[in-house]
Image: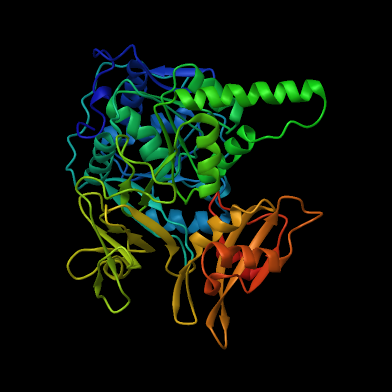
Amino acid sequence: MTLLLPALQSPTGPAASREAVRFGALSLTYGELAAASTALAARIADAGRVAVWATPTAETVIAVVAALRAGVPAVPLNPRTGEAELAHILADSEPTAVLAGPDDALPPALEKLRRVTVDARAFERTEDHPAVEADPEAPALIVYTSGTTGPPKGAVLPRRAIAASLDALEDAWGWTGDDVLVHALPLFHVHGLILGVLGPLRRGGSLRHLGKFSAEGVARELGSGGTMLFGVPTMYHRLAEVLDASADGGVRDTQTRDAERDALAAALSGARLLVSGSAALPVHDHERIAAATGRRVIERYGMTETLMNTGIRADGVPRPGTVGPPLAGVELRLVEEDSTVLTGPEAIGEIQVRGPNLFSGYLNRPDATAAAHTADGWFRTGDVGTVDEDGYVTIVGRKATDLIKSGGYKIGAGEIENVLLGHPGVREAAVTGEADPDLGERVVAWVVATDPDSPPRAEELADHVAGQLAPHKRPRTVHFLDALPRNDLGKIMKRSLHAG
């Protein structure tokens, strides 16, 4: 706790009256959050591990801060997790208690655990109770990764890694206690919980959580003092749609729409920092937001196992389509399949990283931990990318799904997706590879049309890509869908495309 959240050391300290978090009408000052987490920490001090029913509420914040204060590893649980996956996570992590809000209805899988109720509106006011002086290598959180090739694995995140990543972002973004962060991210993963909750609390700033994402909520909170916005590409796409809305319909509808657009544009223009993460933000949405607000969205790159690796600096040059240079303390390299280290702006290879931001390993999986690292300590991200002459990293995609080897060429799915999204007839797009007896793999596009009743011709889209990029990058097959399958973070689930 001393390492992570110094502003919460005392319920009666100098920062006690400052707002720490706000969820709708419910606001907690630093003093109130310190008192609530102190009381809860005393109740769970003897727990080996605790599960946290991670709803987007102040109760989740209290629960996680209490676990950090008590030196007890916390396992955030996605409330939408299915029965089989939840059973696996509980059997693997073996928590002794579950922390949940008073109105949370828990599934049967959690009935055997001791339930500790967390109520942000009614908590015990106790004397200050010093936080446990935990070792920097002690586990703080165990966050389960999505299992694309098997059951989810629990990434053990030590206090050291969390502190290192948040301090690197302080350096890159000029993040201070004066910043007010706005977001509507879920609180069971790195983006929403570590960056979005522990980030502002470590700096002594504040968080305003929207609960449910909406352009109106973003405009309201940024327009009334918010300085930073965190979101995923789906959220920024929706903001771009509002900013770019055409004026059709009745006069009243047009006036309302224009007022919403103007309020949002003004709020985004006034924010100090607009940050997108968890997946690549299409260049088309970058440009639409910049055109309407004069502000550029910046991107960063991280993973559950590595926390934050790279990021566009607040004082740097925003380059749509890139995720910036490595953050302070992070080493990054590109590696070929035969382990050759690649150099030069034309090189494309797997991204490997090492530094104080790395996790300790996968819980109960020494085999998987060893397989994820090289002999000299580099973590194999499984992501493919390039690095330009200024050190800016561009993510091509996942090695397993986004690197297409066709006719002797290495083709990144992301650049084709960006070109497709620049076509006026395309609302959403995903690109994958498919086995081809002649080319090895062929490029396949999955498209949601702007006008479903009059989609563009497949040949038109293929020619559009060939004209913008190169003939060998043209989609050989185009599938039109009503919607692309996405997970809770808005990431497109490409394996589901072929499975369907």
For the point 33% across and 11% down, the residue is 17
Residue placed most toward the observer, 400 or 440: 440
Residue 478 point in image, percent of width and height: 67, 68
Count of picture labels: 0
The image shows residue 92, relative to residue 16, as above or below, that is below
Vertical placement of residue 325 versus 417, above or below: above
Residue 258 occupies quadrant? top right
239, 419: nearer the viewer: 419
Residue 51 showing in the rendered view: no
Query: Residue 132 location, x and y as percent?
Result: 20, 33
**Is residue 308 toward the left or the right of residue 489 in the image?**
left
State whether residue 67 appears in this view: yes
Residue 398 in the image: above or below residue 101 = below
Q: Is residue 384 left or right of residue 333?
A: right
Please indicate whether residue 344 sits to the left or right of residue 258 in the image: left
Residue sticking out furthest to the front: 467
Quadrant in the picture for the C terminus: bottom right
Residue 276 position within the rendered picture, expressed as x and y whole percent measured from the top left: 45, 42
In this image, 157 relative to 114: left or right?
left
Whole-percent x and y of residue 283?
51, 49
Q: Quadrant for the N terminus, please.
A: top left
Q: Residue at x 64, y 56 (%)?
A: 484
Q: Colour scheme in the image?
A: rainbow
| Relative vertical location of residue 85 with respect to residue 498 in this rendering, above or below | above
Q: Nearer the viewer, residue 210 or 103?
A: 210
Q: Quadrant of residue 495?
A: bottom right
The residue furthest bottom is 437
